[in-house]
Image: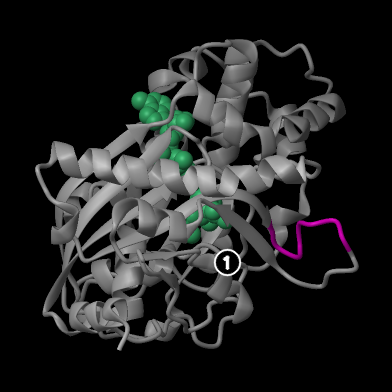
Amino acid sequence: MNAHLARLHQIASQPSRRIIGLMSGTSLDGLDVALCRLTGHGPGTELELEQFRTVPYSDDTRARIRTVFAKEQVSLEYLTLLNPWLGSLHAGAVLQCLREWNIAPEEIDLVASHGQTIYHAPQHQHSHPDFQLNATLQLGDGDHVAVGTGIITLSDFRQKHVAAGGEGAPLAAYGDFLLLSSPDEERLLLNLGGIANFTYLPRAGGDASSAFSTDTGPGNTLLDATVRAFRPGLQYDEDGRLAAAGRVHQGLLAALLAHPFFVAPLPKTTGPELFNTDYLTEAQQRSGTITLPLDDTLATLAEFSAMGVARAVEAAFAERLAPTAIYTSGGGAHNPVLMAALKRHLSLADFAPTDTLGVPGDAKEAILFAVLANEAVAGQPVAIGAGRQRVPAVSMGKISFPG
Ligand SMILES: Nc1ncnc2c1ncn2[C@@H]1O[C@H](COP(=O)(O)OP(=O)(O)OP(=O)(O)O)[C@@H](O)[C@H]1O
Ligand SMILES: CC(=O)N[C@H]1[C@@H]2OC[C@@H](O2)[C@@H](O)[C@@H]1O[C@H](C)C(=O)O
């Protein structure tokens, strides 16, 4: 037997595994590195987050990714070069973290690498009628991560989801279901990243077929892009200070919300391919607000993100009360203006960070991929959302051996 296959067999048979989850989201702030000890698999999975660090991206790395990120037309040569380059960069980041944590690569069982989403093209969003299909592309080749770290690596998690009828996202529901279901309450887990999404979790032991996750629209992506455009040098509106000084412009808000995405059935996904500065400019033109001051624009964009969330929650729970326990994660949870708007629109809910459930919000998505890798080697396809379109019961991740 191939020695790596034998090692993988042994890893799959262990009672627990040490898995490094890697995630780099749409905000391009850096690579999230979560060293997880996962005991068991399936709904009984126990997580111990041993270490977590975000390895910041340099301006050069950000610039390289932005050269192709969410763009319809790019240089194919550049894209080809970026794929192994990012894989090697991510491998280097893993080794750097392991050195800091005083852990040898041999002590790690698996790396679970999401890669960098470069383009997300669900059928409802892309513009090519020749292709009646969903597609999504993540770069950061898994073989490069495996060879660079010497650790068996699972990567490219989203393709199986697409192949089985999903949009390739959000995958959050699969990990949330395994780690965060509670017998005591139904939950909404709200992630406020570049794009916002939520997972609905029925009570543990209840009807798993009703669990699902959906994107709701922009989280921080339009806020960040606007700050970057008006204030070069700033990456985002820290603590929502600029937005807090502004006022919501109802005309611009209505123009921003006038898109079919907000009335499309759940679950659905989106990305900065749609929600970008062109989207904002077009809404400003329609509402005559091109000259609106920056603080008012940001206040309106925060309200827009919150209303996207509120509309998706209303759509999901049109026939009954929505769960009142909402647990937040992602960078937007640190934005008080966004949080205040959410609390106004979902006034019956109690909000708490996922940290109170033992899952630090900033690490949650990196942990998700460690959990998916754990299921792929030791568990079963995660069966949730049955009967709902676009929530296939699959195990995810492609396996790369280091030699
Ligand atoms: N103190 C803060 N005040 C305001 N906004 C903040 C603060 N801290 C983080 N953010 C916001 O959170 C963003 C980073 O969020 P996060 O890391 O969750 O995004 P991501 O993982 O890249 O996104 P996605 O989930 O879409 O992939 C920043 O770009 C910023 O907009
Ligand atoms: C295609 C893609 O990378 N989507 C991301 C993005 O960032 C947030 C939102 O849009 C979510 O759908 C997804 O990531 C998380 C980890 C998910 O799949 O659940």
Q: Could you say which is closer to the camera, residue 243 or residue 318?
A: 243
Q: Position of residue 72 (x, y in %)?
A: 79, 45
Crowd around label 1: few <14 · some 14–19 · many ≥20 (10 Å): many
> Ligand 2: does it lie within 8 Å of the C-beta at label 1?
yes
Q: Could you say which is closer to the camera, residue 191 or residue 142?
A: 142
Considering the image in quadrants, where does the N terminus appear? bottom left
The image shows residue 224, relative to residue 328, as above or below, that is: above
Considering the image in quadrants, where does the C terminus appear? bottom left
Segment colored magenta: 121-128
Give the left or right position of residue 19, taking residue 63 as reference: left
Give the left or right position of residue 130, taking residue 287 as reference: right
Residue name at image x 43 percent, y 80 percent = 395
Give the left or right position of residue 72, taking residue 235 as reference: right
The image shows residue 284, relative to residue 175, as above or below, that is: above
Q: How many marks?
A: 1
Give the left or right position of residue 32, taking residue 79 as reference: left
Q: Position of residue 366 (x, y in %)?
A: 34, 53
Is residue 171 among what the camera can see? yes
Q: Position of residue 132 (x, y in %)?
A: 82, 73
The image shows residue 346, relative to residue 214, as above or below, that is: above
Residue name at image x 72 percent, y 37 percent = 256
Helix, strand or loop at label 1? It is loop
The image shows residue 54, relative to residue 13, as above or below, that is: above
Residue name at image x 77 percent, y 11 percent = 291
Is residue 348 among what the camera can see? no
Residue name at image x 66 percent, y 48 percent = 80
Q: Could you say which is closer to the camera, residue 112 or residue 186?
A: 112
Amino acid under disc 1: Gly
Q: Position of residue 401 (x, y in %)?
A: 37, 69
The residue indicated by pointer 1 is: 168
Q: Main secondary structure of the magenta part?
A: loop
**Residue 56 among those drawn in magenta:** no
